[in-house]
Amino acid sequence: MITEKPVESSAELVLRAIEALSEKAFLPIIGSEKGKFLAEEIRLARPKHVLEVGTLIGYSAILMGKELDADAEIVTIEIHRGEAEQAGNNIAKAVISAKVKIIKGNALHIIPTLQGIFDFAFIDAEKTEYLQYLHLAEPKLRAGAVVFADNAGRFADQMSDYLNYVRNSGRYRSRYIGVGDDGVEISVKLT
Ligand SMILES: C[S@@+](CC[C@H](N)C(=O)[O-])C[C@H]1O[C@@H](n2cnc3c(N)ncnc32)[C@H](O)[C@@H]1O
């Protein structure tokens, strides 16, 4: 019997290549296990405007972008020029229909300058700054927006102010999903 392998899209091939690279030389990408939860939240929320803090080389932007339609846009911020350039190359190779705009710079300075309203935010940069990113983004997040934060298990101590805020401020409905030795915090903005 001949079993045919499913044809992988360009985006899937780029994701697999980055995962392979990450096994050889550690790269702090969200990875395939936690990435499944990110992709699932994107499929459920079907956002049109996504904010990502911490692009690295584009893995998570591609993971989200491949779930989105051509009328959706991801704005992703990366402080390091080299990583931002690699992300641009990887995203071009992935050929996804959603638009991805990479902004090089410090998210603490960039977020206040962004125009428009976002319906999804993925926070995955400096752990001790998560709450600052959120406070800066909050006026631009619509009610019902999903805020997905990586590393809420492994770095819970460094982001304890963030976790305390989304869990106890009354402004979010928040849940933690443990994945292996780490986890993600998924918070829905209530108003
Ligand atoms: C964990 S990696 C992001 C991984 C990526 N989201 C993925 O899953 O493929 C964190 C990235 O955030 C960037 N970063 C750290 N602090 C930043 C800041 N203040 N503004 C923008 N980017 C920042 C780092 O340079 C690094 O590339």
Image (cartoon, rainbow, N blue to C red):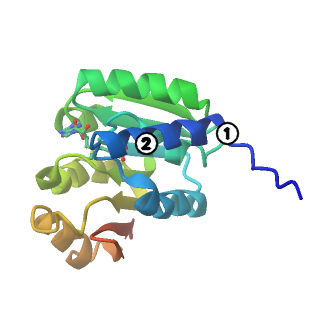
Q: Is residue 71 left or right of residue 124?
A: right
Closer to the chain start, of discs 1 and 2, is 1
Instruction: Pick the residue in front: 55 or 119.
Output: 55
- Secondary structure, mark 1, is loop
| In this view, 92 is above or below 114 | above
Q: Is residue 115 visible?
A: no
Tell me which amino acid carries mark 1. Ser
Q: Which mark is residue 94?
A: none
| In this view, 83 is above or below 177 | above
Instruction: Pick the residue in front: 68 or 56.
Output: 56
Q: Position of residue 135 (x, y in %)?
A: 21, 53
Instruction: Pick the residue in front: 35 or 23.
Output: 23
Q: Is residue 82 left or right of residue 69?
A: left
- Secondary structure, mark 2, is helix
Tell me which amino acid carries mark 2. Ala
Q: Position of residue 181 (x, y in %)?
A: 27, 70
Find disc 1 in the rendering and name its residue: 9
Quadrant occupied by the N terminus: bottom right
Q: Position of residue 121 (x, y in %)?
A: 38, 52
Is disc 1 in contact with disc 2, using a CB cutoff of under 8 Å? no
Q: Which mark is residue 20?
A: 2
Residue at horizontal 50 percent and vertical 42 percent from the top: 15
Residue at horizontal 29 percent and vertical 54 percent from the top: 138
Quadrant occupied by the C terminus: bottom left
| In this view, 152 is above or below 21 | below
Ligand 1: which quarter? top left
